[in-house]
Amino acid sequence: MEKNLERIKDSNLHELVVKAEDAASWIRDGMTLGLSGFTRAGDAKAVPFALVERAKKEKFKVNIFTGASLGSDLDKLLSEAGIINKRLPFQADATMRKNINAGNHLFVDQHLSHTAEMIRNGVLPQIDFAVVEAVSITADGMIIPTTSIGNNLAFVTHAKNIIVEINLDQSLQLEGLHDLYEPAEQGQRLPIPLTKADDRIGTVGMPVDTDKIRGIVFTKYTDSPSPIVPPDHETKEMAQHLISFLREEVKAGRLTNNLAPLQAGIGSVANAVLHGLIDSEFEDLQVYSEVLQDSVFELIDAGKVNFASACSITLSEEMMKQVYGNLEKYRDKLVLRPQEITNHPEIIRRLGLISINTALEFDIYGNVNSTHVSGTKMMNGIGGSGDFARNAKLAIFVTKSIAKGGNITSIVPFVAHVDHTEHDVDVVVTEQGYADLRGLAPRERAELIINNCVHPMYKAQLRDYYEEALTRGGQTPHVLEKAFSFHTNLAESGTMLVEEAKSYV
């Protein structure tokens, strides 16, 4: 214990060390919790585990706010325990997804830059307990986060009480990696003074009123590894199409071989597409993103990326060993920030990002659905894709052209749920090709998307729809009674492919 206490530099706080079960007992029915964690990294673990155990003996419900998805199966366990009233702003767990779609949990799907602003403005319920994972607490009372920041700064600043989980499994070398900055109140704030990815504008830890620290729990948990899979043939093809597009931008004089700061969303597809830059001519790259996945560190190792800024590091098991086992190698190339800074529209627009995010589906006019399967069933959430799409220099969405063995086409006449309107989408990419939609009218976009991005088995079906739509006229031609026919075909017969088109399969 004495050695553990060395991580709490302010000796006045030593008396606050408690067991996770004791800390969990302070949380009551109806409270709102702010839990650290962003895409399976840096999440508070011990106190949530203790709450799950307590739920076996006692019925209670709480609101759970996070940065994004939680690791260690916490979203699954909290959902199964039945203790969630409302969850925001993002999740990525199959069990929680099922309960959200069944109406058992309320889910608020938010742009990830909005949560901290809503907390600051008092729009959301005040946080009763912020439970955050830390490496240490400094002598002047700053909490040093671990592998993510997410919404932690907003949580500890505006919560009534704070519980700190000091994770002994996290390296003290993480100290100094963070840059904590919170904007002032709206109407009173100055421009955020960040003009390039490697700027530092804040403090190395989270300054807090130590009187609000109710308890400190020592833990020893490894972050959950990312479930990403290696690039496959389709994602490699997507990467090559994206590289072809970027080469055209360089040729036109709109980019150089240094490109612009890169942002890539979470998941296997975006990770694989970014990975494709390793064998390209592009170099001296910078990353300004939410999450740093394996591909970013592979690009650093390949000498392609010289700096990466994000709010979370989410890695596969093998890459975790490599990065955290050699953190000194990467320290001068990394910074972690709060998600309202990584996702802030002001900064995204200023830096001129190239943003690469994954779509569930898009339609022939360029509207993108990121969240709702068949228009009604929540998948994970919009995450940060909307923050970046509306404000990036280049808003790029990638997806495989078909899914479920060809029973689903990812390009449809009209998306069943719109997360990103045609006005915010610049380029769409599938393994079939890419469509640069900038400056194109709806009819031009439809022709280009059908020609370049649709899988051969669905081209004729989409052409038939579009040609009939043209007979109806309009700026954006549609056959309204058939606009969702692909989705209704799927619901009724298990495939979007109509009978006369099945000879392509």
Image (cartoon, rainbow, N blue to C red):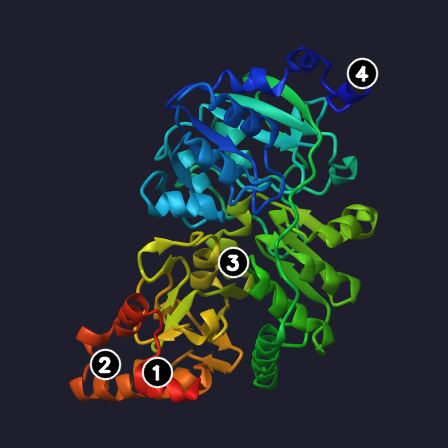
What kind of residue is marked 4? Glu
Q: CA distance from mark 2 to mark 3?
A: 33 Å
Q: Identify which residue is drawn at 35% across, 79% down.
A: 497
Quick check: marks 2 and 3 in contact, CB under 8 Å?
A: no
Q: Verify CB contact (< 8 Å) between mark 3 and mark 1.
A: no
Mark positioned earlier in the residue sequence (2 or 3): 3
The residue that label 2 is drawn on is 477
* Image quadrant in which you'd find residue 366: bottom left
* x and y percentages locating residue 267 in the rendered image: 56, 59
How far apart marks 2 and 4 lie (CA) works out to 71 Å
Label whose residue precedes the other's in the sequence (1 or 4): 4
Labelled disc at residue 446: 1
Q: Nearer the viewer, residue 499 or 107?
A: 499
Among the two numbered marks 3 and 1 on one chain, the one whose residue lies closer to the N terminus: 3
Q: Nearer the viewer, mark 4 or mark 3?
A: 4
* Disc nearest the viewer among 2 and 3: 2
The secondary element bearing badge 3 is classed as helix
At label 4, counting other C-alpha atoms closer than 10 Å, the crowd grade (few under 14, some 14-19, many 20 or more) is few
